[in-house]
Amino acid sequence: ASARQVNIAIIGAGGVGKCFLSQLESLAARRQNQKLVLTYIATSKKAVYSDSYSPIALDSVVSTLSSSSQAPLALPKLVDYLAASGTKTVLVDNTSSQDIADAYPSFLRRGISIVTPNKKAFSGSYKLWQDIFAAKEEGGSLLYHEASCGAGLPVISTIKDLVETGDEVTKIEGVFSGTMSFLFNSFAPTSGSGGGKWSAEVAKAKELGYTEPDPRDDLNGLDVARKLTILARYAGLEVESPTSFPVQSLIPKQLESVASGDEFLARLPEFDAEMEEVKAEAQKEGKVVRFVGSIDVASKQVKVGLEKFDLSHPIAALKGSDNIISFYTKRYGSNPLIIQGAGAGGDVTAMGVTSDLLKVLAQL
Ligand code: NHO
């Protein structure tokens, strides 16, 4: 019998997108009973596709894309194009675009499944969250977004499994940002010495590629707030948006509106003394400071910000850019289920997307 075909459409070919493409190439080569055909790929500027849905070769896709003169399809047109192929289709959204996230209901309603590391759809308005799951039901499509929290770590699948098997999540806490983890592990190490100036650590994190191009996008706490919004919703809380609960920003007020990320970095040393004080205050109590998020289900409290931890606490002892997420539930009692490991980076994030794709393929 001939292999069943599944069409793949991809938007986004940046840090995560490129790693995903190489994982997809090896997956397609190993896939026995399904033929995976790339029929559409786009960045914000360019696209490759054809009216006959001819396969785009995976081994040369990056160069095909960069030499293409085709423009991306507008989203409503893309929905029509993909739905008209007559073949089961999976859309992989490797962007951080809110516009694309807002269009998920239109794709899902037309039977197009989605896998994505993009947090915007699940941490936007509560209405969008409801629309997405209603459209998925209506279209009989599938939807996975493991990498929207904790990169490749099994965080979303774990909370879904806990809830769907009838456990009750009471509290979730942890370090949800790879960037913040790296910054505090090096600024305030448990050894007490060796931490550099705050501004120097931020500059180093940027140099190593851990931060967003503009480090303020990490330091304002919103990335963590988005991840907590998603988890809180799965835990049963109707969180309205990532700005509907307290989020501590580490951007000094005076630098909120400077024009560029570079100017921000240049002026950050003016505020080193403030961060030094925060660190010293924790040290006086024999603790270290870390940037954490927590969800208390009973009191419906979600919060993001700095907290002090004993040196022996697992949150204090994290290494590198690792995330740690502790789930307290009825079943697990006072010893939480803990997930820990790399929480940022192209390859591990793409792994979350590829494993989601495998889950979809198994059901198509
Ligand atoms: P890039 O490198 O900026 O690439 C984005 C691509 O999307 C580009 O090709 C751009 O042309 C395209 N694009 C943007 N808007 C478009 C539009 N409207 N139409 C068509 N194309 C468009 O971004 P990344 O780094 O590859 O990230 C891709 C997605 O993965 C984002 O949603 C990001 O939030 C998500 N993600 C990334 C990481 C990571 O490590 N890079 C993680 C999770 C999810 O676990 C990671 C994480 O949370 C990192 C976080 N900063 C932390 O914890 O410190």
Image (cartoon, rainbow, N blue to C red):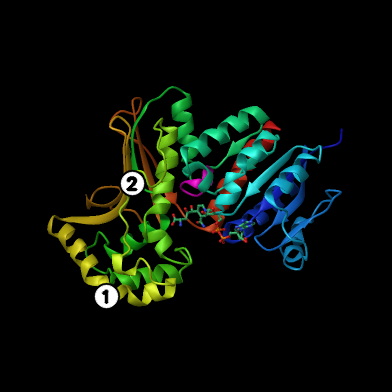
> Is ligand 1 within 8 Å of the beta carbon of the residue shown at mark 1?
no
Q: Position of residue 125 (x, y in %)?
A: 47, 41
Q: Is residue 26 magenta?
A: no
- Is residue 278 visible in the rendered image? The answer is yes
Side (left or right) of 316 relative to 14: left
The quarter in which the N terminus is drawn is top right
Mark 1 belongs to which amino acid?
A: Glu
Residue shown at the point (69%, 47%) measured from the top left: 27
Mark 2 belongs to which amino acid?
A: Gly
The quarter in which the C terminus is drawn is top right
> Would you place residue 122 above or below residue 181 in this image?
above
Q: Position of residue 314 (x, y in %)?
A: 30, 47
Label total for image: 2
Disc on res. 293: 2
Side (left or right) of 112 relative to 223: right
Q: Position of residue 356 (x, y in %)?
A: 60, 41
> Would you place residue 218 above or below residue 359 in this image?
below
| Of the pair 71 and 344, the residue shown nearer to us | 71
Q: Which region shows up in magenta?
A: 146-151
In this view, which residue lies farthest toward the top? 166
Residue denoted by label 1: 270
- Is residue 140 visible in the rendered image? The answer is no
Sequence-earlier tag: 2 or 1:
1
Q: Secondary structure at mark 1?
A: helix
Residue shown at the point (55%, 51%) measured from the top left: 98
- Which numbered mark, 2 or 1, is in the foreground of this view? 1
Residue shown at the point (73%, 54%) measured from the top left: 73
